[in-house]
Image: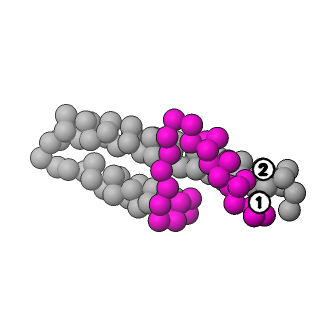
Amino acid sequence: MDDQQRYQQARARVRHIKGFYIHATVYVLVNAFLIMVNLATSPSTRWSTWPLLGWGIGLGAHALAVFGLGGLWGSDWEQRKIQELLDKGKPR
């Protein structure tokens, strides 16, 4: 496999990771809004729990598909991840 192919694979992997983080952000924002609406309209009935749990299962499955059992990122995570994946394929 040449460097260009390895770079394309690394870039695709980074896009999957980025997609997960976007998914997680939307999950937090939407569910925070649903909880606020729930507490404002019918605080005695906790209906917001169901979308939180259902979507949470989907988010967990997405996390497992992308990361397996681990994975963290920082301010320059995209470039570091590309470099890590490129370095994996280099002969030693």
Q: Is residue 22 left or right of residue 27?
A: right
| Label 1 CA crowd tier, 10 Å (few <14, some 14–19, many 20+) | few
Q: Which mark is residue 7?
A: 2
Can residue 61 be seen in the rendering of this structure? no
Residue 37 is covered by the magenta coloring: no
| Residue located at (67% from left, 47% from top) | 82
Q: How many marks?
A: 2
Nearer the observer, 92 or 29: 92
Sequence-earlier tag: 2 or 1: 2
Nearer the observer, 69 or 22: 69
Residue 69 is covered by the magenta coloring: yes
Q: Is residue 57 left or right of residue 18?
A: left
**Residue 38 appears in which quarter of the rendering?**
top left
**Residue 66 appears in which quarter of the rendering?**
bottom right
Nearer the observer, 13 or 39: 13
Q: Are marks 2 and 1 in contact (CB under 8 Å)?
A: no
Q: How is the image coloured?
A: one colour
| Residue located at (78% from left, 50% from top) | 7
| Residue located at (45% from left, 41% from top) | 25
Q: Which mark is residue 90?
A: 1
| Label 2 CA crowd tier, 10 Å (few <14, some 14–19, many 20+) | some
Spatial CA distance of label 2 from label 1 is 11 Å
Name the residue type under label 2.
Answer: Tyr
Q: Is residue 45 left or right of residue 25?
A: left
**What's the magenta region?**
63-92
**Residue 18 drawn at (x, y percent):** 58, 45
SS type, badge 2: helix
| Residue located at (48% from left, 50% from top) | 72
